[in-house]
Amino acid sequence: MSLSTAELAAISVAARWYARLQSGVATDGDRREWHAWLNADPAHRQAWQRMTAVGEQIASVPGALASPALRGADRSRRQVLRSVVMLASAGSLGWLGWRSETTQNLFADLRTAVGERREIRLADGSSLLLNTDTSVNLRFDGRQRVLELLWGEILVSTAVDLSQRPFKVVTAHGEVLALGTRFIVQSQNQGAEVAVLEKAVEVSAHGTDRKVRLEAGQRLNFNARELGPVGRTDASTGAWQQGSIIAIDRPLAELLADLSRYRTGVLRCDPRIADLKVSGAFPIDNTDRALAALESGFSLRVSRYSRYWVTVSL
Amino acid sequence: MSAHELSLRSAVNDLYCDHHGWLSGWLRKRLNNSFDAADLAQDTFVRVIKARNALEIREPRPYLSMIAKGLLVDLFRRRSLEQSYLEALGAMPEWQQPSLEDQAILLQALMEIDRLLQGLGAKVKQTFILSQFDGLTYPQIAERLNISVRTVNNHMAKAMEHCCLMQIQLQLA
């Protein structure tokens, strides 16, 4: 829809009327004249409705807040233009947000949105649980069953395959060969992590020949260059299946980075308290409640600058 | 998947591989912050994907930097408004401050108003704020800005017309 010349003209006249009536010193005579104009033509009425819609939008913010905020923004914008430095960096707080929106991930076979979890049954009877913000490609053929984990986290429960095809999860960093099993793989830019819940898997990094067999109750981190040491799983492993993150003496910054995987927007942590150790169960289906728990349980301050921008500080 | 879909996909992939590094660097130089730069580079490509026009792009770098510049200006506008909004909130007596939830809603509303006012001249905008948010009458504004009441009236009419057209345009977008 574009506006006709007549409509544009009506809007222009309606704006003049609106301005006149808002002067604070409008007379009854002004209002009578306006009324006559309004009733002279349906087009006038329509243009006037548009004016009142603008008025309503303006009234949606208290003037005591809008006036200094708009002025302040103008002032800082002018200053920035003067100093030619386009965009000073926002501040000293560290980023904890991360994103999966690469082209590759957007085109993946299976995808979950931020905050979403989804279970999928595969053609061979295996089941796949996708955690938040995850992208997976399926590469099943006559010889093998391959899941390409592009980004995110999955829990795999493999089924016995009649034709005995091997089952593998391939990430950017290396691969995990299932040995009749239930296991979790998480992969992002810096590296991947695998944890075995039942039976065993064999892990190999792309850049090395070394292979490590992981049994139930074991976990390890790896990247393309190396496999980390084998560790033990604990109550926190795979807690996302039940909708929570379980932290056991975990640095706050790490916990927030983990929470931010389940919410859109920016979650920042004051670097002065990044190493603060926290413990507890935090709901991931309602991360605002998780933040509220941090606020009350650890005397932290959660400042919400907007729905998409939250800072945790002392 | 259709042949067109496939070639579109590979065009986006090529574009990403060939220019993502360059674009990130370009943005880093302007932002002094590699995190924001990485985000905006990503947003730029998301725009390209959504526009579905990767096959028609002949001059990738000017095109990508044009999109990125728009995003830079948006980010900068949002940040400066967010900052001054927080200052305004901080200056209010505590008992008057809205709840956190309302604060977020108000900021969103304020950003939309800011967009309506975008492009107005400084004098006109100042007049508009004094009238609509500070509640001054036209004679009071005239005195404050040392202009005639008639000019105040003209500024206000101009501002309302501008806001109305912006509102219609934004609703269509």
Image: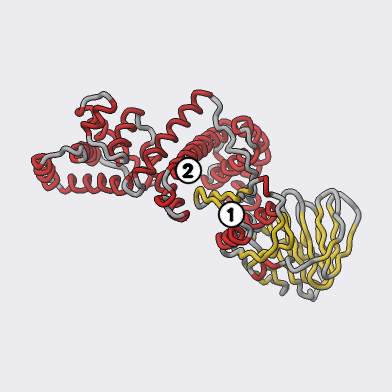
Q: How is the image coloured?
A: secondary structure
Q: In the rendering, at what x and y percent does residue B162 appear?
A: 31, 36
Q: Which amino acid, by three-letter code, is at mark 1?
A: Ser
Nearest to the observer: residue B113 or residue A249? A249
- State which quadrant residue B19 falls in: top right
Quarter residue B165 falls in: top left
- In depth, the one of A102 and A4 nearer the eye is A102
Output the chain of dot 1: B
Marks 2 and 1 in Cβ contact (< 8 Å): no
The residue located at (58%, 38%) in the rendering is A90
The crowding category of the residue bearing disc 2, from other C-alpha atoms within 10 Å (few below 14, some 14 to 19, many at least 20), is some
Name the secondary structure under disc 2.
helix
Q: Is residue B78 left or right of residue A66?
A: right
Give the label on residue B26, or none: none
Q: Give the chain letter at badge 2.
A: B
Whether residue B172 is situated above or below residue A280 in the rendered picture: above
Kindly identify the residue that appears in the image at 57 percent across and 60 percent down: A292
What x and y, as percent, mark residue A300?
Answer: 61, 54
The x, y position of residue A269, in whole percent, is 63, 48
Horizontal side, residue A121 vs residue A54: left or right: right
Residue that label 1 marks: B2
Q: Residue at x 69, y 68 (%)?
A: A239
Q: Name the outermost residue toward the right.
A: A210
Looking at the picture, tell me which residue is in the foreground, A209 or A194: A194
Residue pointed to by mark 2 = B86
On the same chain: label 2 and label 1?
yes
Give the alpha-carbon distance from disc 2 to disc 1, as whole Å: 50 Å
Residue at x 40%, y 40% (from the top left corner): B115
- A26 or A129, which is in the foreground? A26
